[in-house]
Structures are given as C-alpha cells and as structure tokens.
Image (cartoon, rainbow, N blue to C red):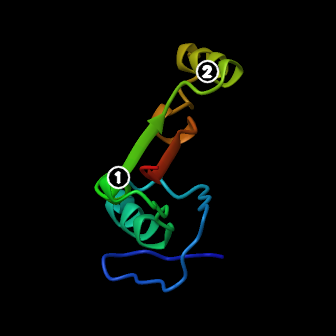
Amino acid sequence: MQMLWNKNAIYGTKYDIVICADCTFDKATHPHLLHVIRSILKKPISNDKSDEKSTNEFRVELLVKYDDKIWECHERCLKDEQGYYDKDTHYPLIMRASWNL
C-alpha cells in the first residue's frame, strides 16, 4: 500500500510488518515517516504484566554495514575520482523499527 506521511497522517490499519523502500532521501521527512510507522506497526501482546513497560518502547536501529559485498562496492565508489557517487544519496541504509518484544 502506498502511504503518504506528514505530521497529521493517521492510518487505522495495523500491520505485523512494514517494509519501506526509497523513502528516506529527504531527511526532513524522517520524523514523520517514523511517526507513521510507529502508529501502524502492531504492538506485541504480552501476557506478563511485569513486562508491560518494555512493550511500550519503540526501538529504531540504523544498519549501515549489513552486507560485505555492498560495503565493498560502497568503499570503491567513495574512492572513485569521477565524483558522481554521493554516499548520502546512493548508499542504501536499512532502518529497523520495532516495538520491544
């Protein structure tokens, strides 16, 4: 499903998994994207009342060096004298966001 996000975006459906692609180029939209992901990602259900606090914590993790071949290609491009490679635009990052389990 294509989603547009901004400060006021509200979606009623909850999902087990959210996969996003090509949506982090504009850094100004990152907080809005996280807001939407946080609001549509299902919280895990815990039967243990002592664990209630941890299921309310939303965690975001940025994965930078997640694959050796991609990292090697990235390093080669950084050394390239052509100057066409912009690490902030061309290197794919992976963001993992989840509710604590």
Q: Position of residue 55 (x, y in %)?
A: 38, 56
Question: Which residue sits at x=60%, y=23%?
Answer: 74
Secondary structure beneath label 2: helix
User: Closer to the camera: disc 2 or disc 1?
Assistant: 1
Toward which corner of the image does residue 81 lie, by quadrant?
Answer: top right
Q: Amino acid at mark 1?
A: Asp
* Residue closest to the eye, 85 or 74: 74
Q: Position of residue 65 (x, y in %)?
A: 54, 24
Reply above or below: 92 against 40. Answer: above
Along the horizontal axis of the image, is 35 left or right of 15? Answer: left
Q: Position of residue 33 (x, y in %)?
A: 42, 64
Question: Which residue sits at x=62%, y=58%?
Answer: 19
Toward which corner of the image does residue 53 lie, by quadrant?
Answer: bottom left
Along the horizontal axis of the image, is 24 left or right of 91? Answer: left
Numbered badge on residue 71:
2
Reply above or below: 11 against 67. Answer: below
Q: Quadrant of the image for the N terminus?
A: bottom right
Along the horizontal axis of the image, is 59 left or right of 83? Answer: left
Q: Position of residue 87 (x, y in %)?
A: 49, 32
Q: Residue furthest right?
A: 69
Q: CA distance from mark 2 to mark 1?
A: 38 Å
- Residue under label 1, please give it: 51
Estimate how packed mark 2 is, as few (under 14), some (14 to 19) or many (20 or more) residues with alpha carbons within 10 Å. Answer: some
